[in-house]
Amino acid sequence: TTNVSITGLHIIGNNNPFTAVGWNGSAIVGGTGAFLMSISYIHTNGNQIENVYGLSFLNAGEGYAWDAIGNTFIYVGQGLNINGSHSIQQDNHFWFGGGIEASGDHNSITHNDFHLAGLQNVISLGGNLTPVLSCLGIEASYNIMEVPPGLNGISAADCVQGADISHNQIEITTIYGFGIILKSEGISAVAHNSVSSNRVTGAPTACFYTDTSSDNYFDHNRCVGTAFYGAIFGGTGPEYSDHNVYIGANSDILNEEPNVTSMFDTLGGTGAY
Protein backbone atom coordinates (compact mmCIF):
# COMPACT_ATOMS: atom_id res chain seq x y z
CA THR A 1 0.00 0.00 0.00
CA THR A 2 1.43 3.39 -1.00
CA ASN A 3 0.28 6.96 -1.61
CA VAL A 4 -2.59 7.15 0.87
CA SER A 5 -3.96 10.40 2.32
CA ILE A 6 -6.04 10.32 5.51
CA THR A 7 -7.54 13.71 6.29
CA GLY A 8 -10.25 15.22 8.45
CA LEU A 9 -11.22 12.23 10.58
CA HIS A 10 -12.65 12.77 14.07
CA ILE A 11 -12.46 9.54 16.03
CA ILE A 12 -13.62 9.17 19.65
CA GLY A 13 -12.80 5.95 21.49
CA ASN A 14 -14.32 4.49 24.64
CA ASN A 15 -11.41 5.09 27.03
CA ASN A 16 -13.41 7.66 28.97
CA PRO A 17 -12.75 8.47 31.72
CA PHE A 18 -9.20 8.01 30.54
CA THR A 19 -7.23 5.11 32.03
CA ALA A 20 -3.54 4.64 31.27
CA VAL A 21 -2.78 0.96 30.61
CA GLY A 22 0.37 -0.95 29.74
CA TRP A 23 1.50 -1.45 26.16
CA ASN A 24 -1.44 -1.61 23.78
CA GLY A 25 -0.48 -2.13 20.14
CA SER A 26 -3.86 -1.34 18.65
CA ALA A 27 -3.89 1.69 16.38
CA ILE A 28 -6.38 3.89 14.56
CA VAL A 29 -4.14 3.77 11.49
CA GLY A 30 -1.49 1.04 11.43
CA GLY A 31 0.66 -0.52 8.76
CA THR A 32 3.06 -3.43 8.60
CA GLY A 33 4.34 -5.28 5.60
CA ALA A 34 7.14 -7.43 4.25
CA PHE A 35 10.27 -5.62 3.13
CA LEU A 36 9.45 -5.88 -0.57
CA MET A 37 5.83 -4.83 0.00
CA SER A 38 6.37 -2.10 2.56
CA ILE A 39 3.68 0.47 3.30
CA SER A 40 4.98 3.89 2.34
CA TYR A 41 3.97 7.44 1.47
CA ILE A 42 1.16 7.68 4.02
CA HIS A 43 -0.02 11.23 4.76
CA THR A 44 -2.24 12.08 7.73
CA ASN A 45 -3.40 15.64 8.18
CA GLY A 46 -6.02 17.50 10.18
CA ASN A 47 -7.35 14.50 12.11
CA GLN A 48 -8.54 14.54 15.71
CA ILE A 49 -8.34 11.36 17.80
CA GLU A 50 -9.62 11.14 21.36
CA ASN A 51 -9.84 8.67 24.24
CA VAL A 52 -8.26 5.54 22.78
CA TYR A 53 -6.27 2.89 24.64
CA GLY A 54 -3.60 2.32 22.00
CA LEU A 55 -1.94 4.38 19.29
CA SER A 56 -3.11 7.01 16.89
CA PHE A 57 -0.81 6.06 13.98
CA LEU A 58 1.64 3.14 13.98
CA ASN A 59 4.42 2.22 11.60
CA ALA A 60 6.53 -0.54 13.10
CA GLY A 61 9.50 0.20 10.84
CA GLU A 62 8.53 -1.34 7.53
CA GLY A 63 8.14 1.30 4.86
CA TYR A 64 8.97 4.98 4.96
CA ALA A 65 7.60 8.48 4.45
CA TRP A 66 4.78 8.39 6.97
CA ASP A 67 3.81 12.01 7.56
CA ALA A 68 1.65 13.15 10.49
CA ILE A 69 1.01 16.88 10.15
CA GLY A 70 -1.45 19.11 11.94
CA ASN A 71 -3.28 16.41 13.91
CA THR A 72 -4.72 16.66 17.41
CA PHE A 73 -4.42 13.80 19.92
CA ILE A 74 -6.42 13.98 23.16
CA TYR A 75 -6.02 11.20 25.72
CA VAL A 76 -4.44 8.84 23.19
CA GLY A 77 -2.90 6.17 25.42
CA GLN A 78 0.23 5.29 23.42
CA GLY A 79 0.50 8.46 21.35
CA LEU A 80 2.18 8.46 17.94
CA ASN A 81 4.67 5.75 16.94
CA ILE A 82 6.16 6.15 13.46
CA ASN A 83 9.38 4.18 12.97
CA GLY A 84 9.62 4.36 9.20
CA SER A 85 12.48 6.47 7.88
CA HIS A 86 12.16 9.77 6.01
CA SER A 87 8.98 10.66 7.89
CA ILE A 88 7.66 14.01 9.09
CA GLN A 89 5.82 14.63 12.36
CA GLN A 90 5.01 18.31 12.46
CA ASP A 91 2.52 20.79 13.95
CA ASN A 92 0.69 18.14 15.97
CA HIS A 93 -1.03 18.83 19.29
CA PHE A 94 -0.89 16.33 22.16
CA TRP A 95 -3.16 16.64 25.19
CA PHE A 96 -2.43 14.06 27.89
CA GLY A 97 -1.88 10.40 26.95
CA GLY A 98 1.25 9.40 25.03
CA GLY A 99 3.77 11.43 23.07
CA ILE A 100 6.03 10.53 20.10
CA GLU A 101 8.25 7.51 19.49
CA ALA A 102 10.41 7.28 16.37
CA SER A 103 13.34 5.00 15.55
CA GLY A 104 13.91 5.50 11.84
CA ASP A 105 16.53 7.69 10.20
CA HIS A 106 16.27 11.10 8.55
CA ASN A 107 13.01 11.82 10.35
CA SER A 108 11.83 15.34 11.11
CA ILE A 109 9.97 15.97 14.38
CA THR A 110 9.30 19.69 14.61
CA HIS A 111 6.85 22.32 15.87
CA ASN A 112 4.76 19.91 17.94
CA ASP A 113 3.29 20.89 21.30
CA PHE A 114 2.64 18.61 24.26
CA HIS A 115 0.45 19.31 27.28
CA LEU A 116 1.24 16.71 29.94
CA ALA A 117 1.64 14.04 27.25
CA GLY A 118 4.26 11.30 27.15
CA LEU A 119 5.08 7.81 28.32
CA GLN A 120 8.58 7.38 29.74
CA ASN A 121 9.60 10.35 27.61
CA VAL A 122 7.65 13.00 25.75
CA ILE A 123 9.73 12.41 22.59
CA SER A 124 11.65 9.14 22.27
CA LEU A 125 14.22 8.90 19.47
CA GLY A 126 15.97 5.68 18.50
CA GLY A 127 15.84 2.72 20.81
CA ASN A 128 16.16 0.28 17.91
CA LEU A 129 17.30 -3.12 19.18
CA THR A 130 19.09 -4.14 15.96
CA PRO A 131 22.83 -4.28 16.81
CA VAL A 132 25.19 -1.74 15.22
CA LEU A 133 22.34 0.08 13.48
CA SER A 134 22.65 3.81 12.80
CA CYS A 135 19.58 6.05 12.91
CA LEU A 136 21.13 8.98 11.09
CA GLY A 137 20.06 12.55 10.53
CA ILE A 138 17.07 12.88 12.87
CA GLU A 139 15.82 16.40 13.54
CA ALA A 140 13.89 17.17 16.74
CA SER A 141 13.47 20.91 16.87
CA TYR A 142 11.11 23.73 17.87
CA ASN A 143 8.89 21.51 19.99
CA ILE A 144 7.16 22.85 23.09
CA MET A 145 6.48 20.45 25.93
CA GLU A 146 4.98 20.50 29.39
CA VAL A 147 6.42 17.27 30.74
CA PRO A 148 4.23 15.05 32.97
CA PRO A 149 5.48 14.41 36.50
CA GLY A 150 8.38 11.96 36.67
CA LEU A 151 8.97 11.75 32.91
CA ASN A 152 11.73 13.07 30.66
CA GLY A 153 11.55 15.57 27.84
CA ILE A 154 13.58 14.15 24.93
CA SER A 155 15.44 10.84 24.93
CA ALA A 156 17.98 9.88 22.26
CA ALA A 157 18.62 6.16 22.67
CA ASP A 158 20.45 3.35 20.82
CA CYS A 159 21.31 4.10 17.17
CA VAL A 160 20.75 7.89 17.28
CA GLN A 161 23.72 9.44 15.52
CA GLY A 162 24.17 12.80 13.85
CA ALA A 163 20.88 14.15 15.20
CA ASP A 164 19.94 17.81 15.50
CA ILE A 165 18.13 18.37 18.80
CA SER A 166 17.63 22.10 18.98
CA HIS A 167 15.39 25.04 19.87
CA ASN A 168 13.04 22.98 22.04
CA GLN A 169 11.27 24.44 25.06
CA ILE A 170 10.99 21.84 27.83
CA GLU A 171 9.22 22.50 31.11
CA ILE A 172 9.69 19.87 33.82
CA THR A 173 6.56 20.23 35.94
CA THR A 174 7.84 18.48 39.08
CA ILE A 175 11.15 17.38 40.55
CA TYR A 176 12.76 14.28 39.00
CA GLY A 177 13.04 13.55 35.33
CA PHE A 178 15.53 14.95 32.84
CA GLY A 179 15.24 17.55 30.13
CA ILE A 180 17.29 15.82 27.41
CA ILE A 181 18.90 12.37 27.73
CA LEU A 182 21.51 10.81 25.46
CA LYS A 183 21.84 7.20 26.53
CA SER A 184 22.81 3.92 24.88
CA GLU A 185 21.90 0.54 26.34
CA GLY A 186 25.00 -0.87 24.65
CA ILE A 187 23.29 -2.19 21.52
CA SER A 188 24.14 0.67 19.15
CA ALA A 189 26.09 3.87 19.67
CA VAL A 190 24.62 7.23 20.61
CA ALA A 191 27.18 9.63 19.19
CA HIS A 192 27.93 12.71 17.10
CA ASN A 193 24.70 14.47 18.05
CA SER A 194 24.19 18.21 18.33
CA VAL A 195 22.15 19.51 21.28
CA SER A 196 21.82 23.26 20.88
CA SER A 197 19.71 26.28 21.78
CA ASN A 198 17.29 24.32 23.96
CA ARG A 199 15.66 25.83 27.04
CA VAL A 200 14.87 23.61 30.02
CA THR A 201 12.92 25.07 32.92
CA GLY A 202 11.32 23.77 36.10
CA ALA A 203 12.86 21.38 38.60
CA PRO A 204 14.42 18.38 36.84
CA THR A 205 17.01 16.08 38.33
CA ALA A 206 19.23 17.46 35.56
CA CYS A 207 18.57 19.48 32.45
CA PHE A 208 20.99 17.38 30.38
CA TYR A 209 22.20 13.84 30.99
CA THR A 210 24.54 11.51 29.09
CA ASP A 211 25.12 7.81 29.76
CA THR A 212 27.19 5.43 27.59
CA SER A 213 27.36 8.05 24.85
CA SER A 214 30.24 9.85 23.19
CA ASP A 215 31.29 12.72 20.98
CA ASN A 216 28.17 14.82 21.43
CA TYR A 217 28.17 18.60 21.28
CA PHE A 218 26.13 20.80 23.64
CA ASP A 219 26.04 24.48 22.81
CA HIS A 220 24.00 27.57 23.66
CA ASN A 221 21.51 25.69 25.82
CA ARG A 222 19.88 27.27 28.85
CA CYS A 223 19.11 25.36 32.03
CA VAL A 224 17.12 27.72 34.23
CA GLY A 225 14.89 27.10 37.22
CA THR A 226 15.62 24.85 40.19
CA ALA A 227 17.35 21.83 38.66
CA PHE A 228 19.31 19.63 41.04
CA TYR A 229 22.13 19.45 38.46
CA GLY A 230 22.57 21.60 35.40
CA ALA A 231 24.21 18.79 33.43
CA ILE A 232 25.34 15.27 34.28
CA PHE A 233 27.97 13.88 31.93
CA GLY A 234 28.16 10.13 32.54
CA GLY A 235 29.02 8.72 29.12
CA THR A 236 32.18 7.20 27.76
CA GLY A 237 33.52 10.49 26.38
CA PRO A 238 34.47 12.68 24.82
CA GLU A 239 31.70 15.30 25.15
CA TYR A 240 31.82 19.01 24.35
CA SER A 241 30.02 21.81 26.19
CA ASP A 242 30.22 25.32 24.79
CA HIS A 243 28.41 28.56 25.73
CA ASN A 244 25.73 26.90 27.84
CA VAL A 245 24.02 28.32 30.92
CA TYR A 246 23.84 25.73 33.71
CA ILE A 247 22.08 26.44 37.00
CA GLY A 248 22.04 23.59 39.51
CA ALA A 249 21.04 23.59 43.16
CA ASN A 250 23.65 20.93 43.94
CA SER A 251 26.18 21.25 41.10
CA ASP A 252 26.04 23.13 37.84
CA ILE A 253 27.96 20.32 36.11
CA LEU A 254 28.45 16.82 37.47
CA ASN A 255 31.18 15.19 35.41
CA GLU A 256 31.51 11.41 35.62
CA GLU A 257 33.03 10.68 32.21
CA PRO A 258 36.48 11.19 30.71
CA ASN A 259 37.44 13.89 28.25
CA VAL A 260 34.64 16.41 28.79
CA THR A 261 35.54 19.83 27.42
CA SER A 262 33.67 22.81 28.88
CA MET A 263 34.30 26.16 27.19
CA PHE A 264 32.63 29.50 27.91
CA ASP A 265 29.87 27.86 29.94
CA THR A 266 28.08 29.98 32.56
CA LEU A 267 27.81 28.20 35.88
CA GLY A 268 25.03 30.25 37.44
CA GLY A 269 24.00 28.14 40.42
CA THR A 270 26.51 26.82 42.91
CA GLY A 271 29.38 27.27 40.49
CA ALA A 272 30.44 23.71 41.26
CA TYR A 273 31.94 21.53 38.53
Image (cartoon, rainbow, N blue to C red):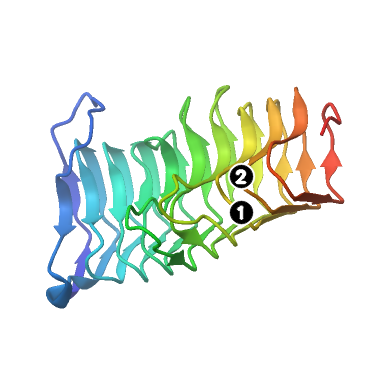
- Residue 56 lies, with reference to residue 256, above or below; the image says below
Tell whether 215 sits left or right of 33: right
Q: CA distance from mark 2 to mark 1?
A: 6 Å
Question: Percent from the top left, x then y, of residue 173?
Answer: 55, 27
Q: Nearer the viewer, residue 220 or 169?
A: 220
Q: Residues within 10 Å of mark 2 (few under 14, many from 20)?
A: many
Q: Nearer the viewer, residue 209 or 169?
A: 209
Tell whether 258 sits left or right of 51: right
| Residue 219, picture quadrant | bottom right
Question: Percent from the top left, x then y, of residue 111?
Answer: 50, 57
Question: Percent from the top left, x then y, of residue 224?
Answer: 73, 35
The residue at 43%/69% (across/down) is 106
Can you see residue 251? yes
The residue at 44%/44% (across/down) is 185
- Residue 209 lies, with reference to residue 8, above or below; the image says above
- Residue 163 lies, with reference to residue 184, above or below; the image says below
Q: Nearer the viewer, residue 118 or 6?
A: 118
Give the label on residue 251, or none: none
Tell whether 89 sits left or right of 232: left
User: Under tag 1, what secondary structure?
Assistant: loop
Q: Residues within 10 Å of mark 1 (few under 14, many from 20)?
A: many
Q: Earlier in the sequence, mark 2 or mark 1?
A: 1
The residue at which mark 1 appears reads as 214
The residue at 77%/33% (across/down) is 252
The residue at 54%/62% (across/down) is 163
* Quadrant that contains the N terminus: bottom left
Question: Percent from the top left, x then y, of residue 61?
Answer: 26, 62
The residue at which mark 2 appears reads as 235
User: Under tag 2, what secondary structure?
Assistant: loop
User: Mark 2–mark 1 contact, CB under 8 Å?
Assistant: yes
